Amino acid sequence: MSVYFQKTYQRSFGTFPLKGDELRDAVLIAAETGYRSFDTAQMYENEKDTGAALKETGLPRDELFVTTKVSNSNFDENRFLISVEQSLKDLQLDQVDVLLLHWPPADGNIEPSLKLLEKARARGLTRHIGVSNYTVSMMREARAIIDAPIVTNQVEFHPLLNQDKLLTAAAETGIPLASYCSVARGEVFKHAIFGEIGETYGKSAAQVVLRWILQKGVSINTMSKKPANIAANFDVMDFTLSSIDMARIEDMTRTGYRIVGKDLVPYAPDFD
């Protein structure tokens, strides 16, 4: 079971690409809505803004679940731990709840960065560790490299992209998946099926998509600046999609719509 499937943490509020007042306002609205899990990264260049906003919420630390990610540029013995310590300073935290490697290293050798991640956990800089954008083979290799539990592999996951191979690897390795680009940056709204299914449940197309992801056993990250959307993305726990509707949505994965690939991130691995 994913550590995110506790309390309200299966619904994380993502902060990319927000900064400054936009980020502050969105985080405050999200916290008021009920979000307690917040996702940021060194690469987003908004950890300081996120830390200030979380402080302003007035929420006690034990109610928050904060994830950040180490940039590939810091996958170095001399920079890794220093960069994490800077992240904690910017976030105004003694430790984060989950520390992820943002991308596999460009050379494909995942062992050094995983060892550094494990060291960060041993030093108490984070409660849990995980990875992002790992392939099936990398997930298997990672499990053999370090002993500490890897609590998630955060990947692009939505109903327009078939990620069955990663789901199988998640079950095999015990590394649960977490979703980014959960509504495919709006691409799902071009397909009528999600709205049609939503009418049956009194829910929106976005809510249907997010519920489908959750029922696949994958936690979600969503971001919006609009209060109504922030609330709607959180309000996905009071209905269950039928097996028939799950299958109808599953059929949409044949679309093969991938947002994050080598054209966007040149050092991305060859995804399954």
Image: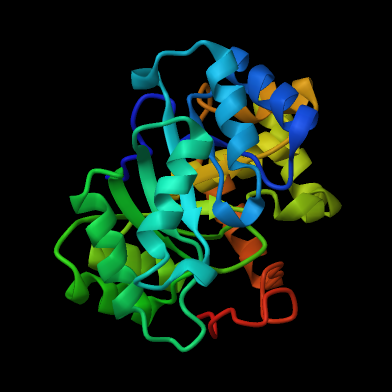
Q: Position of residue 139 (x, y in %)?
A: 33, 72
- On the question of residue 227 being in view, the answer is yes
Q: Quadrant of residue 88?
A: top left
Q: Quadrant of residue 26?
A: top right
In depth, the one of 153 and 148 nearer the eye is 148
**Residue furthest toward the bottom?**
107
In depth, the one of 134 and 57 nearer the eye is 57
Colour convention: rainbow
Residue at 24%, 60% in the rendered image: 118
Residue at 55%, 50% in the rendered image: 41
**Residue furthest toward the left?**
147
Look at the image and tell me in which quarter the N terminus lies. top left
Side of 164 relative to 175 (left or right): right
Q: Position of residue 109 (x, y in %)?
A: 37, 86
Q: Is residue 2 depicted above or below 50 in this figure? A: below
**Residue furthest toward the right?**
190
Q: Position of residue 192 (x, y in %)?
A: 82, 49
Side of 40 relative to 27 (left or right): left
- On the question of residue 9 being in view, the answer is no
- Numbered disc total: 0
Residue at 18%, 58% in the rendered image: 148
In depth, the one of 5 and 243 nearer the eye is 5
In depth, the one of 209 and 78 nearer the eye is 78
Q: Is residue 196 depicted above or below 154 in this figure? A: above
Q: Is residue 51 depicted above or below 151 in this figure? A: above
Q: Position of residue 180 (x, y in %)?
A: 59, 53
Side of 175 relative to 89 (left or right): left
Q: Is residue 81 depicted above or below 38 in this figure? A: below
